[in-house]
Amino acid sequence: MRGKCENPPPFLAPECFQGRVVEGLGYSHVAQAIEWLARETSAEGSGALIVFLGFVKGIVEGGRVKKLLYTAYEPYASRSLDEIAKSFSSRQGVRGLVIVHTSGEAVVGTPTLLVASSCLHRKECYEATVEAVERVKREPPIFKLEVREDGEYWVLWDGRRVKRGERPP
Amino acid sequence: MVRLKAFGYLVDILGWQEKTVAKPTSDATVAVALQLVVGEGGSYEWLLEQILKGTVMVFVNGAAAGLDKTLDNDDEVALIPLPSGG
C-alpha cells in the first residue's frame, strides 16, 4: 500500500519518491528531508531510513581540496534523478526514496548528495539506497570540477582526474 | 537557429559554453552544426572521436541523438561528457 507524503519542506514536492537538483545543498536541507520522509512514511509501516550522504572530501590524490563546483544540465539532471527515485516506487517494502543532489559551489565538508530510502524492513532499504547511489553516479548529466591547492581538475566518470584545459587521455 | 551547449571539461577544451548557429540547409544534421561551430581541425576531429567512442554524448532537446540527426530551428544540441555526479 502506498500512501502520500504531504507537507514537504519548500525544496521538495509532496511525493514519497522524488529526486531533484538543489543549488547549494546544505545540512538544513538534509535534516529537513530526513525528518519529513521518516514522518510521512511511518504511517505506512516504515520504521527506518537508510541514508547515504556524500560530502566534499578535503584531500584527493595527496592534494588539499578547497571546493567542488558542480554544474548540471537542467532540467534533464533533475528529471533523471526523479526517474531514478520513482523507479523504486513499486519495489517491495520500499515506502519512499528521496534523492537530492547539489549544484554550484560546495566547500569541504558540505553535503553533495543525499539519498534516503524508507522501508518496512532494513534489508530492502540497504539495497534500494545503494542501488540508487550507483545510478546517480552514472546517469544524470551532472559534472564536477575539483578546485585544489595544486590546480583545478575535472573529475571524470571513472574517478580519474584531468587537469582543467587538458583533454582526457 | 540552433543552440549548442557544452558541459564539463568540454567547456574548457572547446572554449565556449553556449553558441547559436544558423542552419545552412533545411536538412542540416548535428555533425554539420558541430562542424560550423567547432570548426575544422584538431578540436573537431577530437570531438568526433570522443562521440564515436562514447565518452561524449550528444543530446538533442534532452534525448540522446546521433551525429546524423536532422535538426530543426530552435533545437538545442548538448554535448555531454559521461557524467561525474555524486
Image (tube, coloured by chain):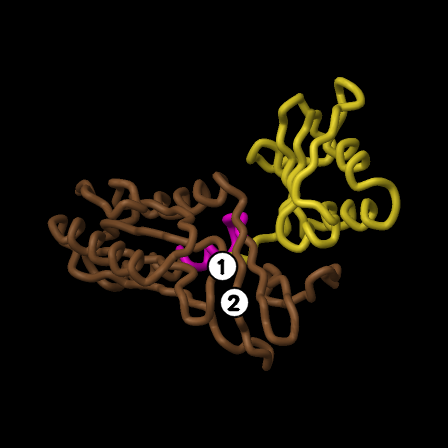
Chain colours: A brown, B yellow
Residue numbers of the magenta segment: A132-142
Q: Position of residue B27 (x, y in %)?
A: 75, 20
Residue A138 horizontal/vertical position (percent): 52, 54
Res A2 seen here:
no
Q: Residue at x 63, y 46 (%)?
A: B80
Task: Give whichever of A102, A15 is nearer the camera.
Answer: A102
Which residue: 54% across, 59% down?
A69
Can residue A13 be seen in the rendering of this structure? yes
Q: Amino acid at mark 2?
A: Lys
Give how far across and how far down residue B18 sits, in percent: 66, 40
Q: On the image, numbered disc 1 is attached to which residue?
A: A105
Between A11 and A162, the residue placed more toward the observer is A11
- Give the SS element for disc 2: strand
Graded by Cα atoms within 10 Å as few (under 14), some (14 to 19) or many (20 or more), the crowding at tag 1 reads: some
Q: Residues within 10 Å of mark 2 (few under 14, many from 20)?
A: many
Q: Amino acid at mark 1?
A: Glu
Whether label 2 touches label 1, CB < 8 Å:
yes
> Is residue A160 one of those drawn in magenta?
no
| Residue farthest toward the left in the current orientation of the protein | A43
Q: CA distance from mark 2 to mark 1?
A: 7 Å
Residue at figure coordinates x 80%, y 23% from the top left: B24
Considering the numbered disc 1 on the image, is that residue within a helix, a strand or a loop? strand
The residue that mark 2 highlights is A67
> Which residue appears at 70% of the width and 54% of the height?
B12
Quadrant in the rendering for residue A112: bottom left
Q: Quadrant of the C terminus of chain A?
A: bottom right
**What label does residue A119 carry, if any?**
none
